[in-house]
Amino acid sequence: MRKVVLITGASSGIGLALCGRLLAEDDDLHLCLACRNLSKARAVRDTLLASHPSAEVSIVQMDVSSLQSVVRGAEEVKQKFQRLDYLYLNAGILPNPQFNLKAFFCGIFSRNVIHMFTTAEGILTQNDSVTADGLQEVFETNLFGHFILIRELEPLLCHADNPSQLIWTSSRNAKKANFSLEDIQHSKGPEPYSSSKYATDLLNVALNRNFNQKGLYSSVMCPGVVMTNMTYGILPPFIWTLLLPIMWLLRFFVNALTVTPYNGAEALMDIDEDTAEKFYEVLLELEKRVRTTVQKSDHPS
């Protein structure tokens, strides 16, 4: 029986590179691409099947920044498959990045230059927005939409006799100081991406504590500093042209500078378990509230 692998955000960047690497290792897989843009997903499917004709590749339309889309997509997945062996929770956004040039140039001539290059700590902020679900966009896209997806797909994932795995795409930009249980969506702070990635690491711990006995195991991976559409949006192209030779040079000393999506896809990472469990309970409460809102919008009086 073919193993079934579902990947969110599979049409570009790390997700796209991951598809190619998975099939290069085992072209007997059934890949399910969960993507917002169906035309891009179809093009990816055709490319993958051209190079791996014995594989099976299917598509599910899913936008993890929309809970209705997640629930609909999950229903389609449950109709297609009896179980999932691997669920790669990869889709994510880094919206409207603001680059602090002063902090950057100060950092270049400091002892923290390598740390700055590998984490973007202190030099990168974002302007977040609110989704149609009334949630912060970064929080919903990078974490909560995936959390709802896991909850919806529990029947396909939880089989003690045949374990399944969740693999999250996290980041070296995840920082404990940017996360708070009092503001889990980081609506009051300037670094929602960092907060969402630390929240991912917390949720990973809580999922293992709550689901390992059911046959579901969770892990996080950091692909390193990778040049994708998300990264290229941070700076003007000419600056990347100047920086890339430096990054390739530093790569001899810093393995986190993976640079290409293909290298980043190979990677498969200080977390307080009590905070993780409290965060999990907060997410469950938020799930109840949001589901009530979504159900009301689906069935207006």
Image (cartoon, grey):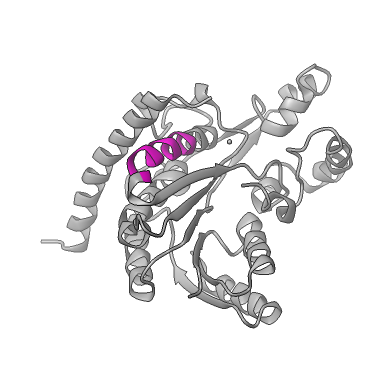
Q: Residue at x 84, y 19 (%)?
A: 109
- Is 121 above or below relative to 227? above
**Foreground of the two, 96 or 4:** 4
Name the spot of residue 259 as percent of width and height, x first.
Answer: 77, 46
Q: Residue most toward the front?
A: 161
Can you see residue 86? yes
Residue at 85% x, 46% y is: 241
* Number of numbered labels in the structure image: 0
**As drawn, is 222 to the left or to the right of 104?**
left
Q: Nearer the viewer, residue 242 or 18?
A: 18
* Residue 176 magenta-highlighted: no
Q: Which residues are magenta?
A: 199-212
Image quadrant assignment for residue 282: top left
Looking at the picture, how far across and down is residue 23, in whole percent? 64, 69
Residue 176 drawn at (x, y percent): 51, 24
- The structure residue drawn at horizontal position 40% and vertical position 50%, both measured from the top left corner, is 216
Residue 35 coordinates in the image, percent (x, y): 50, 65
Can residue 132 be seen from the camera position used here? no
Q: Nearer the viewer, residue 300 or 117?
A: 117
Single out the residue that lies furthest toward the top.
111
Main SS class of the magenta portion in the image:
helix
Q: Residue at x 69, y 49 (%)?
A: 264
